[in-house]
Image (cartoon, rainbow, N blue to C red):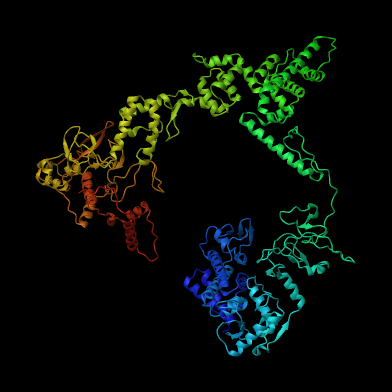
Amino acid sequence: MSLSEQLQEVRSRAEVCLYSGGRVVEVRAGVMAMANLPLPPCSKYHHIAAETMAIENSFGSNRKETLASLQRLSTALNILEKYGCNLTNPNRPKYWRTVKHNNPVFRATVDAIQGGRAVLCLYGYSNQQPDGLSFPDDVTDPDVGRVAAVTLEVMSLRMELEMLIKEGHPHPEFYERIIPTLRHKDVGLNTDAVVYHSSSTSCHSDGQTKSLAFPLHHHSSREISHGSSLSSNHQGLRSIQIFSTSSHKHPGNCTICGIFRISAHCLTCLQGLCAECDRLYHSNPDRASHRRTAVSSSKTRSNHSSSTWRCLHCTKVNSVQDVLCEECERPRLEPINSKADESQPATTTDWQCKSCTMVNAASSILCEVCERPRLATRPPVTPSHPPTTPPRPPAPVLGMPGDPDSQWVCQFCTYLNYSPATVCEMCDLARPEPALMPVKLRPPSPVRRVPALPVKPKEPPHEDLDIWRQRLMKEEGLKLIQLIRDGEKKGVSPEEVYTSMKVAGDSSIVPCKWLKTELPLLLDQIRMLVATSSLQYISDKTTPEHTNRSSEGLTEVSRKEVDGSETESVIQLSRAEAKQAWLTAGGDTERAAKQALRDRLAKVKELCALGFSDKARCHDVLRQSGGEVRGALVLLQRPLLEPFHKRIWSDKPESPVDIHHPDKQRTCRRLLAVYDLPSWGRCELALSLLLEHSAPYSLEDVVQAVKESHDREFIKRVLAKECPICLSVFPHSKMQSLTSCQCSVCCGCFQQHFTIAVRDKHIRDMVCPVCWEPDINDPEHLNSYFSTLDIQLRECLEPEVYELFHKKLTEQALIKDPKFLWCCHCSYGFIYDGDQLKVTCFQCRNSFCAQCKKPWESQHAGLSCEQYQSWKRENDPEYQKQGLAGYLRDNGITCPNCRFQYALSKGGCMHFCCSQCRYQFCSGCNNPFHTTCAVDECSVTGLHAHHPRDCLFYLRDWEPSRLQALLQKSGVVFNTEPPPGTQTGLCGVIEQKDEGGQQTDSACGAQTQPGHAGLCEKHYREYLVSLINSHSIDPAPLYSSNELLLACKRYKVEDTRRDGDDSFACYSRLLKKLMDEVPLGDKVPRKK
């Protein structure tokens, strides 16, 4: 099998393990096998550019530095490997679609190497986002097969680099060929002799692998001497090799030195060599017969010019991506001897970036290095005599005054050039023609300049006029700022400071002092001008022929403005108004007076528009409020609100709303203010309802209804609700309802019903008086119902009735406590915390057993309840006389809700209602009777319970002989004859009877039958069923076919008849399924 086939097989197996969730050991084995294959990186890796990544990310002048850079590459590959494994994992992370650049780990690893983002693009992260990379929006899931292939190559390359770093790579020559500094084990290229050695590696079938190495171990004397001669004759080449190892590698450079461009390709050893390396390498007799093909010099020269550049200061050879020299950090400049070539027009296939001077292809729009767009340039001109550029004059020395007119800045690349050069030294574009110098104007300033000082400065020289102006503006501005800050500390605004300096005309004054001494006089002057102007207008208006035209400008303003106001009084300004006008006018007194007059008349006009027609009063309140319209409104409205304020603060009660008042709007306003109705329309609706003839509505009821709705008919229905108990009509607000139903009754009937229920009935009778909901037997509804009812009864019941309700509610809660006991003597209940059987009632002081609830006798001491009952049956003559009637009484009915015991037989009706808690249940199986069934798919309506098959509810229909047969089959002994001394003839079992609507307890009195142990047939069946329940006997084996089918239908046991089954097989299978799937009753009493 060839190496290519081995690679394909290993790759396929490893990819399947990677994306199918195989074991880590299998994936690692596949990666190791792929890394150990003797193939160069260019043949082994099909997706990632492994060879290019290794070359571009290897730095250093010796092997140690190069391995350190490869270690960084390995770390970045490790992070990329994790990205790939996350995408192939079926349980991908939540944010697998994006890779953020702001992640510090990503920036320090993947983003710090060349080719890292290209691997992410191979994964599928092809969408460029502002903060990272992401999958395209239309891609819902990554291509797992492709990601697995790329991830496998990343893992293999990382493993090869790790083996290379740890000196464990089986074929290091593949990487030593592309990274020359890896060939030198200790000291790199800084040796006195360069020794060449031809080492053979495992060859392919086409014999392609022969690589060049530079080992430092001893060789034959012939090779050493030959290498010494080479080193002595070619020191220049050696120095260039030593210098170039710190620069970036380029795939088009020589395989050996990595600096100069390839001039020849060797077809035998498959290497590209420069001229010097080709001559030295193939001078060895063993390699003299190698076949080589020459590479054109024009291509090499063009490639060299576009891949590296040499610094003109330190002769350092740098990569084309470097704008600054790596050694001296000076910018890239073209050599002087190439100026003649620059004058020639460039070829149409290349263009040079104006920012980084990179030569790009003609098809490129953006620069390959700085990614800036291509700028339009003027077409090349070929003059007959090329212009001669004079030499660049020396730059002015730092600290020495230079001539600014000898410098000019290029408008394209902003490079600083020196005259008399007419072409930019950086971008070769011509210097623009200087435009005519416009007259320089001072820039506008938000703060006016402070007047000049009295001492006039010396006339500045003509050439420094602009600088002098700027300095003067700066000094004046700083002084003004300082004065403003001082004024703010004393409560003076910046406008006041600036205006005071402007009016004073002297920069030496202190604005704060001037404002205190001089400003009041100016303000009084402005007020006097306004008053004089208004007075002059009044006198002109009253005198038909006036000749005095003094203060013509101000009077004209007052004439134009005052004509609209028709004032007959002198306008008096406040100092605040005069000050505001003075600031607005910039300190001009006459302008300030005009402005103040205009403002005052505009404010008076505004007040008149609001309904205040007394203009003299408007002028007066504006003067009092300092020209503020809001303050003037307060003063004008205060007299109007005085009656309202008196009524609000009066101790007299508010008069009721008179709906029959002739002013309907006044009534609506009262409704709107007093009852907070949502709108004026609702007020009119309420008033119209109240004014209807024979309307039985009160004002409060109508207002409440109108707040809830605006529909007139709906409001009428709400205001006329009929109580279903007393049949009276009430508004909806006077009706009450429970949360358990939709019934509504009036407040009186509601209160009366629950008062009677609390005083005379059980707490479970406190339900709706109309529909008798809810069902109190449901314990889930019980707590929520009573918690809501408690809130309603607190408002409507009297205090003593509400206290009784709480007492009964507390007793209802105590019944559920497992330590709660009922006294068998007086039916008093209490909580007993003791552990003794003998309990003494706190009410009647009689004792009873805490376990069996029987009256306490001295014989019970030291005996369990079962032993005591056995002793009593054997030794108590009275108990023996009662016979099985006493047995049925002792095993009577116990309420499953409150555990109250009844010494009664179960009788014919199985529906029993506890007198203590009103819980309704079946006396045979203790299951509750209810009207709302909680069993799924139950179709029974009305009061019912779901009985198990061993309940007395079903077994009471069996004949006594059949019940006896069931007991005999199970080996249970039963009585057929009455005990000696027992009264025969009539059944003496105590049962509950309904006599005249009252529940009474009395003897059965039915005729006894022979063989029924002195009981009637009904109670003898009850006796036999109690034995069946006590021993948990299943009655199903005695079912007939019809009974079995009926029971299966009742308990939803389904079984299809199979083909070929006879009746007995079908019966047996159905009986077994019924007994397995449907258990006996879990609440059936099991006492003996």
**Is 824 left, or right, of 539 in this rendering?**
left
**Is 539 left, or right, of 1066 in this rendering?**
right
User: Where does the image place residue 453, in percent across and percent down from the top left?
Assistant: 74, 33
User: Where does the image place residue 423, in percent across and percent down from the top left?
Assistant: 82, 60
Residue 452 visible in image: yes
Q: Residue at x 59, y 26 (%)?
A: 679
Spot the residue most to the right.
384
Residue 658 visible in image: no
Numbered marks: total: 0
User: Where does the image place residue 753, in percent across and percent down from the top left?
Assistant: 37, 27
Q: Nearer the viewer, residue 780 or 1034?
A: 780
User: Where does the image place residue 54, in percent across and percent down from the top left?
Assistant: 60, 72
Indicate the quadrant containing the N terminus: top left, top right, bottom left or bottom right: bottom right
Q: Nearer the viewer, residue 135 or 442?
A: 442
| Whether residue 640 is situated above or below residue 817 in the rendered picture | above
**Is 282 left, or right, of 420 in this rendering?**
left
Q: Residue 283 falls in which quadrant of the image?
A: bottom right
**Is 851 left, or right, of 715 in this rendering?**
left
Q: Nearer the viewer, residue 816 or 967?
A: 816
Q: Nearer the viewer, residue 908 or 767?
A: 767
| Whether residue 1082 is situated above or below residue 279 in the rendered picture | above
Q: Residue 395 falls in which quadrant of the image?
A: bottom right
